[in-house]
Amino acid sequence: MSPGAHNGAVKTELGRRYHFAASHRLHNPALSEEENWRLYGKCNNPYGHGHNYILEVLVSGKVDPATGMIANLADLDGFVEREVLEPFDHKSLNEDVDAFRSTVPTTENLCIEIFRRLKAFPKAQLERVRVQETSNNSFEYAGDNPEGFEG
Amino acid sequence: MVLLTRKIEFAASHLYNNPDFSPEENRRIFGKCNNPHGHGHNYTLEVTVAGEPDPVTGMVLDLKDLKEILEREVMQRMDHRFLNYEVPELAGQIPTCENIARVIWNLLDPKIKQGKLHRVRLYETPDLFADCYRNGSEGAKA
């Protein structure tokens, strides 16, 4: 296919959105019951609660002139399914995900954990992840890359 | 620096097929996007321009001007078209979200005289999009 598919002056990223539902409870065992309640409010209710999370994954790389793609969606979807959706969807983040046995599963920490899991995607460079907890709250993480935000 | 974003929607059809691949390879790599008669999407395009607001008008650029540029460069070219056959800028390329976004970037960048094109985001579906930025530190820091 046409070599015109390349353009060094433009950086292109591929964004893909995924959905999962999970429960969590915000509670830090190092703090007293009162402190936890003051800090986390109803998110500290003892049995937890759930959200429909939306995960946005952004990857960058060369657009392959033969396929027109940065990464084949089937590869990205399979990787995210295995690394994040299968272990997180319809689970309790506190109880079912090892990382949150010792870390409070705020959506900030969820972003960091998801980024850590997806960083190894072999077919493209992970730029950042964005997790929407509700339609009013979302969080983004780009690892240590200072240019991971806004291209 | 202020970022201004305008959104437009267009509908178009496409198919993915690389004539250098065998029919089996095309099917394996592109899946149902390789169906021979094509299929379509409602694309959503978000165009972001970066600049300082003019002290007199308070505007980064006049939205009317941006609207006209988008109408001329994108809507007239792509809306209700078959992207493979009717958009010369995509000739010889697979019309993926990545490639269409880059073609749109290259069409818009020279036309935007007030402010600077900062980002082109093209949604093919609500769950799939491509972003284009200017390569290098200038685009990243804007």
Image (cartoon, rainbow, N blue to C red):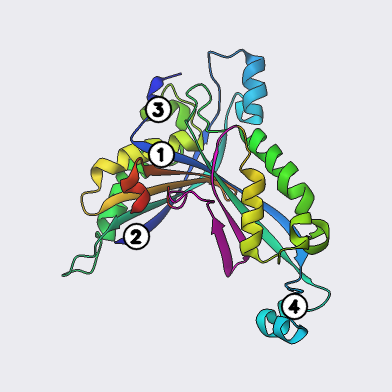
- The image position of residue B80, as x and y in percent, is 46, 40
Q: Is residue A125 left or right of residue B136?
A: right
Image depth: mark 2 or mark 4 in front: 4
Distance of label 4 from label 3 (alpha carbons): 51 Å
Mark 4 vs mark 3: which is more N-terminal?
Answer: 3
Q: Is residue B10 left or right of residue A94?
A: left
User: Which residue is painted at 66% across and 54% down in the image?
Assistant: A113
- The chain that hosts pointer 4 is A
Q: Are the residues under badges 4 and 3 in a single subunit?
A: yes
Residue under label 1: A11
Residue under label 3: A6
Residue under label 4: A44
Magenta region, residue range: A123-149
Distance of label 3 from label 2 (alpha carbons): 27 Å
Q: Which mark is residue B129?
A: none
Amino acid type, residue under disc 3 in the picture: His
Q: Which mark is residue B4?
A: 2
- The image position of residue A69, as x and y in percent, is 53, 31
User: Which residue is painted at 74% across and 75% down in the image?
Assistant: A30
